[in-house]
């Protein structure tokens, strides 16, 4: 579940409060209502950074205090820079904020990804086939006879063998055919993070079937706005839980599991 709070979209009962207080109250209620239903939470740092220094402090409290222990946190930051800078980004995410995994842009190559992979007990999700409409602008470009996103998937297999951290891929639910191709390239063991269900229009059933391995696992389907803003009224937390339950049941139906 994505935790991307927008003060302009908070439920009516919270909008008259101080923005930071309102967002924190909103997140606490949402987490309480959904924590037994999710396999992971994925806060996007931009929504907190946009709130200024207090927002960044809230992100740290969210990861270290508000979210229950035992539920992994994927910090969505999409970092990508030269090795010395990447090392500081890795320290900020894993040591400063305490995230369990991060999203990383592979455009600069292995030396920009390797600092994140040094943390053997943490995870890295490389952007591979993103869920946005503009993904085709670059990710479909031919690269030695194959689309670039397929080359990224192949590189991920190589890079995983070169560092201790766990390496997965971000592949959007809005492109189920490409999602199936990536699963075939990387094999059974690689974890796929699959955004794009809900507000972005991804087909949940097709995405789940394409992303899951033969055992029905190793895929994390992410939904943010569709759950967070299931209601704009006082029942927002209860509505979020109902939507999360509906989505979890739909995922199980797609996999043919109980």
Image: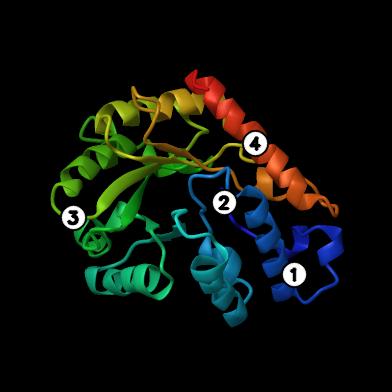
Quadrant housing residue 220: top left
Instruction: Please tell me which of labels 1 and 3 falls first in the chain.
Output: 1
Q: Disc 4 marks which residue?
A: 245
Question: Who is closer to the viewer here, 32 or 157?
Answer: 32
Q: With 66 as the anchor, is 110 left or right in this view?
A: left
Q: Earlier in the sequence, mark 4 or mark 2?
A: 2
Q: Position of residue 233 (x, y in %)?
A: 85, 52
Contact, CB < 8 Å: mark 1 with mark 3? no
Mark 1 vs mark 2, CA separation in Å = 18 Å
Q: Residue at x 58, y 42 (%)?
A: 37
Q: Are marks 1 and 2 in contact (CB under 8 Å)?
A: no
How many marks on residues? 4
Q: CA distance from mark 4 to mark 2?
A: 15 Å
Where is residue 193, by image quadrant? top left
Whether residue 160 is visible here, answered yes or no, is yes
**How far from the left and from the top, in percent, is residue 194?**
46, 39
Circle 3 sits in a helix, a strand or a loop, which is it? Answer: loop
| Circle 4 residues within 10 Å: few <14, some 14–19, many ≥20 | some
Number of the label disc, if any, that sits on residue 2: 2
C-alpha gap between disc 1 and disc 4: 25 Å
Residue extending furthest toward the top: 256
Label 1 close to label 4 by CB (< 8 Å): no
Whole-number angstrom distance, CA of label 2 to CA of label 3: 27 Å
The image's mark for residue 22 is 1
Q: Which residue is mark 3?
A: 164
Could you tell me which residue is drawn at 86 percent across and 60 percent down? 12
């Amino acid at each position: 579940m994505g935790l991307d709070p927008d003060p302009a979209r908070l439920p009516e009962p919270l909008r008259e409060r101080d923005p930071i207080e309102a967002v924190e109250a909103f997140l606490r209620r949402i987490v309480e209502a959904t924590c037994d239903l999710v396999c992971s939470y994925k806060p996007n740092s931009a929504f907190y950074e946009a709130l200024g220094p207090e927002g960044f402090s809230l992100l740290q409290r969210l990861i270290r205090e508000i979210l229950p222990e035992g539920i992994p946190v994927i910090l969505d930051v999409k970092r990508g820079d030269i090795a010395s800078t990447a090392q500081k980004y890795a320290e900020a995410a894993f040591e400063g904020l305490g995230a369990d995994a991060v999203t990383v842009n592979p455009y600069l190559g292995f030396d920009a990804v390797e600092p994140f992979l040094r943390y053997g007990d943490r995870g890295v999700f490389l952007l591979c086939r993103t869920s946005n409409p503009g993904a085709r602008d670059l990710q479909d470009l031919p690269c030695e006879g194959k689309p670039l996103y397929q080359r990224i998937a192949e590189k991920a297999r190589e890079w995983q063998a070169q560092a201790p951290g766990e390496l997965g891929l971000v592949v959007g639910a809005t492109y189920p055919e490409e999602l199936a191709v990536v699963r075939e390239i990387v094999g059974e063991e690689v974890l796929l993070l699959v955004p794009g269900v809900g507000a972005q229009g991804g087909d949940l059933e097709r995405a789940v079937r394409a992303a899951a391995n033969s055992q029905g696992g190793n895929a994390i389907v992410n939904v943010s706005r569709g759950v967070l803003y299931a209601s704009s009224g006082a029942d927002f937390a209860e509505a979020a839980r109902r939507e999360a339950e509906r989505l979890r049941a739909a995922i199980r139906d797609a996999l043919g599991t109980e």
